[in-house]
Image (cartoon, helix red, strand yellow):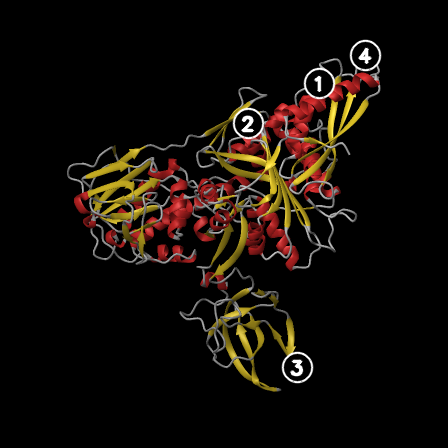
Amino acid sequence: MKISLNWLKRYIDINASTEELEHVFPMLGLEVESVECLGLPPLENIVVGEVLKKEKHPEADRLSVCEVAIDKSGATEQIVCGASNFKVGDRVPVALVGARLPGDLKIKKTKLRGVPSSGMMCSATELGLGEDAKGLMILEGNPEIGTPINDIFNDSDYVFDLEVTANRGDCLSYLGVARELAAWYNLPIKQPEVKTNLPIATAPAADSLLKKLSLDTENCPYYTAISIKGVTIAPSPEWLQKAITAIGLRPINNVVDITNWVMMESGQPLHAFDANKINGSEIIIRQAKDKEIITTLDSKKHTLDASMMVIADTEKPLVIAGVMGSLDAEVDETTTDIVLESAYFEPVSVRKTARKLNISTDSSYRFARNIDPQQTLQASLRAVDMILEIAGGKLSSPIVVLGKPTREANVIEVSPDFIRAKCGFDSTDEAISSIFKRLGYTVDQSDKSLWTVTVPSYRPEVYRPIDLVEEFLRIHGTVNIPEGKPQFQALARNDDRIDRFTSEARNYLAAKSFSECYNYIFRDKADLQTWFGEKQAQGLALGNPLTSDHTHLRPSLIPGLCEALKHNQDHNNIADNLFEIGHVFRFIDGKLWELLSIGFVTRVNSEERRWRATEKPDFFLAKRVLMDLISLAAIPEKMIALKPLSRELMWQDNHSATGNDILQDGFRMTLGHVNLKLIKDLKLDSPVLACELLIKPELFDKSGQPKVFKAFSPYPSSNKDISVIVDATTLADDVQSTIEKIAKQAVSGAFTVEEVSLFDHYQGKGIPEGKKSLAFNLRYRAFDRTLGEQEVAQAFDRLQDKLKAESEYIIRTQ
């Protein structure tokens, strides 16, 4: 946002220097990108002088020794000059001793080749007025001797280029910036005077240029239009052209320049149509038709779709709403009648349209940042005043208004003690309320302990008590906070179970020699289709992506981690074990879910980069890490059920497993090798072992419930081992579950089977091909006695008999 200081002074009487304003703007939250001086900067001790004598320097052929009159009393100075383009009687700018020229050149008394010189006659370049290769600047018009040079060139200006954050749409206007400075300096605002007082109608008058106005879209809650007959299109007055040129706008004609002036003044974009180019004398605010064509004012053709809003007549679109008008209704030198539009368009609609069409204008920039709908009508009346004054004409109708402003002022209840506590220093109620009032807020202090603050509609981002704290500190000035010891309150232990779990998981994985990664949560569509398929890609598309390669939400951490492995490989980085904790998004049963995810990856065949010095990464080592993470999440081990995974693009068939249902159980885990084709496409030189644990946040509500503990048995346990031969494809979990179930039946409740655990897995000599041997330990225990050897043996025999009868497992005897 470019702000001309001269233009700004129309709304606030401010005498601060440019250097001071460069400091103040950032304190208000408006970063200064640059400051540009237009014309002559303020210069002291530089006056109009007249050359009385000009003599050759006795020691230098190219220098002249001059006597120069410097004020009307007749005072003179001797000045040595190297220019040759002047003569006796010329009036020139003279920098006196003590003057400081642009570029920080200070004028001092000196001697040039032995001749004293007190001052300097200046060229245009030395004054900062451009380049002048001829020499001295000869002043035309015989200005009075001794006149300060700034009085001769009194049209100088400074232009501040301010970086306005997306939440401060109110500062995309001169009045918005003036309000900020008025609050800072405690000065009044000079509001533009509006002379026109028009009746408001909901439909055009019968004799109006505009016969009908229709609103046929929800993306325009408020629209106004007014007709003016008999305008004279001509170049704008010099003052108007100079003002808009100073901030980088191009003068077009008086009507268009006035709409730009009012937009920069108030922040409200306006548009003027040539009324005689509107077919059917009807304006319709509607959504565009698919493949509808419009040629915009920059002479470019654009193909529209139904997501875009247009202002149209009965035949064609006249404006891409909030973005740019069309050539078909352009105001040009032939225009005599106009229709002036002022409206509030939904920010999201304008932002999406501008992005899709790759058009960025001052109007779309403001609409996308949520301008104040309460100023829509006032800006229109301001423009009407200026058009009637500058372009002539007369009003053809009352102002037609459709809809109403949708935004109400925010009302916040806040305690002054809350503000003091958050600021960390004492401030009186009067000082706090004074700042709010300077910002334009209404403060009801009838309840001394709880104020009611009404925030103007142009500040929608201020809606919480903490926002008022920020507003107070902003205007109070952080540099004005008194020095003192830090004041703080001791906070209770963080009881957020999700935070505790992620913190513990992070520490655990770091201890296991994993390095943490942070990746973007956005992915590109083609990338998602490769890793997850078309269905997930469609469900995760963003409505308004930031960039063309960040168009979708990520459904998994694994692709980003694999890309990080590739980056490390390419840069000879030894970090081969990576993890990430973050949120992912899954489209499940027609609904989008946001899930907590913990993912880790490791390269399998990296001989010099071992996961741990004594352990080469494999499926079972990764499973151990996964089980530890599940334990940290307080998920009961009995809930876990891993099954072979197949027909998923990201995972390698027959080398991966998954378990549990995210919707039913609240978590889902997947473990195994990443699809080798994907690894090959990434050009990784070794397979990748990966694991991802997805958790619904609601799971922590259940896991946080009070735990019920049972007493331990004081009696010793009795142990038995059993080994069974099963198909090589049979899961150990299934076998373990079957043995545990039958073992509990076999003890008949007389004592318990405390645990069944796998301790050996064998394939090889003595085991038939296609089979494997699994060995389990069974731990028996009673709570009321020491178990006798015979009763344990009987229970174990019953287990073996039932296994033989009810399963296909072969019990090994040796």
Q: Which residue is rendered at x = 77% and y = 18% of the image?
A: 794
Quadrant location, the C terminus: top right
Question: Looking at the picture, does residue 398 appear above or below residue 366?
Answer: above
User: Disc 1 or 3, which lies upstream in sequence?
Assistant: 3
Disc 4 or disc 2, which is closer to the eye?
4
Residue 181 in sight from this viewpoint: yes
Q: Position of residue 91 (x, y in %)?
A: 47, 72
Q: How far is disc 4 from disc 2 in space, using C-alphas?
A: 38 Å
| Image x and y of residue 634, in percent | 68, 28
**Helix or strand or loop: what does disc 3 sit on?**
loop
Residue of label 1: 746
Visible in this render: residue 708? no
C-alpha gap between disc 2 and disc 1: 32 Å
* Image coords of residue 429 (percent x, y): 60, 27
- Per the image, the residue denoted by label 3 is 114
Q: For mark 2, what is the residue? A: 664
Q: Amino acid at mark 2?
A: Gln
- N-terminal label among 3 and 4: 3
Labelled disc at residue 395: none
**How many residues crowd mark 1 within 10 Å: few (<14), some (14–19), many (20+)?**
many
